[in-house]
């Protein structure tokens, strides 16, 4: 058994009595109430999910296992001479809550190498799709196609035992994580680079992805940063919630992740990162060589709003301040691409959009989210095919949601099944209330 798996098992055993006690002794204690607004309005703010992997404070932003983004980046072991930590070490942190040593991290890097072989049929499945399919269709289909590899499904079919279910969920999750960078890079090179596939160098996850994409350093660090920043945003976001919901039916990690990635592909969620670059390119095209001023940018923002569309990359269901994932990527841009034209436009949006959204008076949060800043970095390093950005978001998001469903099985979380009401029932509640 690997050090991580041993540690995870210890943590699970320590944790289980806490969950059991809460259910047995305090099961009837109220966590909150649900208003009609929340029942109709996407359950915003309803506190009915449990996760220990990350927590999102509306003012402060995300903490991974209690650590802010800068704390996480500083604490985890890094490859020599690199600015960002091993993604494998981050997987260890999310699963156990402990920062791994360099030795534990490198053991995990080796473990990932031993699992990274993608079955050949997965590539046949991708190639069987129309080439103009969205890369998220290719990505999600590839994940689902691998379901026959599931150790969890095998365990279920051979005699399921609730106490041990985490083990095969962990195995499937680690297998998937080890393979996703190669699948993502394959889709990119197959779809946009005439199928000129670059072999997996079998190093760490960041290096592998950069090499297979065909992009030089520091893109390996960009990949590490990107995957870690996009990993988890507590459980209520659509991709994490979908993955958790599907896993709660005792579907395995392949079914669950593929479903979660379908949620990520929506423009109000992960697809917003491609929308930001698309929106900016459209502005640049309309300007036809004219340097945008803040006044011109304001005009385009109002045009978009008046046309009934949202400004991608701004607003959030929970956050009420600038997303620290935005701030973290902005810091990277200031260091590595301060004079980049698109970065300057993105920065201009930061100066003009919040005031406009406030003036319009609809969005509860006028500040930028993670998606406003991620595309510009990818564009700078040569990935101008912005349809692909959500696939990279997906590789990162997989780390968080797979850690979550491993713990879901460890703690035996129930089949998710909220109750619905009819409109007439709500009208009745309204009359009485
Ligand atoms: N541009 C224009 N209008 C907005 C924006 C925005 N960026 N954000 C919110 N609104 C509107 C929203 O459409 C709603 O309008 P209506 O009453 O007509 O339905 C109103 O403001 C109230 O919405 P909120 O309660 O502030 O936001 P909600 O929790 O419903 O939605 C988002 C959150 C993220 C879906 C929303 O802010 C949005 O559509 N943003 C743009 C898309 C985006 O960047 N998504 C990525 C989120 C991060 N991620 O990666 O997943
Ligand atoms: C996410 O990373 O999932 C997004 O910021 C959306 C959310 O948290 O609701």
Image (cartoon, helix red, strand yellow):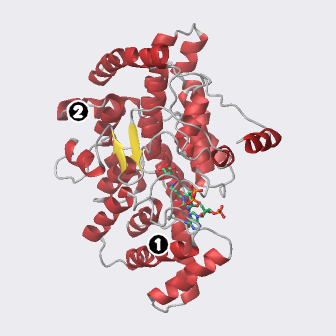
> Which percent across, then down, holds residue 168?
47, 19
**Residue found at x 65% / y 28%:** 417
Residue sticking out furthest to the front: 432
Q: Nearer the viewer, residue 427 or 40?
A: 427
Left or right of residue 258: residue 9: left
SS class, disc 2: loop
- In the picture of the structure, the residue carrying the numbered disc 1 is 354
> Which percent across, then down, holds residue 405?
49, 29
**Residue found at x 32% / y 16%:** 14
Residue sticking out furthest to the right: 424
Placement of 100 over or under 230, stated as above or below: above
Q: Nearer the viewer, residue 356 or 227?
A: 356
> Which percent across, then down, holds residue 388?
53, 58
Picture quarter with the N terminus:
top left
Placement of 109 over or under 13, stated as above or below: below
SS class, disc 1: helix
Q: Nearer the viewer, residue 352 or 197?
A: 352
Does the numbered disc 1 mark a residue whose Cβ is under 8 Å from ligand 1? no
**Residue found at x 17% / y 47%:** 80
Q: Is residue 282 visible?
A: yes
Placement of 369 over or under 108, stated as above or below: below
Q: Which mark is residue 100?
A: 2
Q: Which mark is residue 234?
A: none
Q: Distance of mark 1 from mark 2, alpha carbons?
A: 39 Å
> Which percent across, then down, holds residue 40?
69, 47
Q: Nearer the viewer, residue 393 or 99?
A: 99
**Of the image marks 1 and 2, the number of the one nearer the N terminus:** 2
């Amino acid at each position: 058994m690997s050090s991580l798996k041993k540690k995870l098992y210890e943590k699970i055993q320590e944790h289980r009595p806490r969950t059991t006690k809460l259910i047995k002794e305090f099961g009837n204690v109220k966590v909150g109430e649900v208003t009609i607004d929340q029942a109709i309005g996407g359950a915003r703010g309803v506190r009915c999910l449990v996760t220990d992997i990350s927590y999102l404070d509306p003012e402060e932003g995300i903490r991974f296992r209690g650590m802010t983004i800068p704390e996480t980046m500083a604490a985890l072991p890094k490859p020599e001479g690199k600015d960002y930590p091993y993604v494998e070490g981050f997987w260890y942190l999310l699963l156990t809550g402990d920062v791994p040593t360099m030795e534990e991290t490198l053991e995990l890097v080796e473990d990932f190498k031993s699992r990274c072989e993608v079955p050949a049929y997965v590539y046949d499945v991708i190639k069987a799709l129309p080439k103009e399919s969205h890369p998220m269709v290719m990505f999600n289909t590839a994940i689902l196609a691998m379901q026959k590899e599931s150790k969890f499904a095998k365990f279920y079919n051979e005699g399921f035992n609730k106490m041990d279910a985490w083990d095969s969920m962990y195995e499937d999750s680690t297998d998937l994580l080890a393979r996703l960078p190669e699948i993502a890079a394959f889709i990119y090179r197959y779809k946009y680079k005439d199928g000129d596939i670059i072999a997996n160098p079998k190093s760490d996850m960041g290096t592998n992805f950069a090499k297979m994409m065909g992009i030089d350093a520091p893109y390996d660090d960009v990949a590490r940063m990107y995957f870690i920043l996009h990993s988890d945003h507590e459980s209520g976001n659509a991709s994490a919630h979908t993955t958790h919901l599907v896993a709660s039916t005792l579907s395995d990690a392949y079914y669950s992740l593929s479903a979660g990635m379908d949620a990520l592909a929506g423009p109000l969620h992960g697809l917003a990162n491609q929308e930001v670059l698309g929106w900016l390119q459209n502005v640049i095209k309309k300007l036809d060589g004219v340097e945008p001023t803040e006044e011109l940018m304001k005009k385009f923002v109002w045009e978009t709003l008046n046309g009934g569309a949202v400004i991608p990359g701004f607003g959030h269901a929970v956050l009420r301040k600038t997303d620290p994932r935005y701030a973290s990527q902005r810091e990277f841009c200031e260091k590595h691409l301060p004079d980049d034209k698109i970065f300057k436009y993105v920065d201009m949006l930061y100066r003009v959009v919040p005031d406009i959204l406030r003036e319009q008076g609809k969005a509860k949060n006028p500040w930028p989210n993670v998606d406003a800043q991620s595309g510009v970095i990818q564009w700078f390093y040569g990935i101008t095919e912005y349809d692909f950005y959500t696939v990279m978001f997906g590789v990162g998001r997989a780390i968080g949601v797979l850690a979550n469903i491993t713990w879901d099985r460890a703690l035996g979380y129930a089949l998710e099944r909220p109750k619905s009401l009819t409109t007439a029932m709500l009208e009745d509640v309204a009359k009485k209330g």
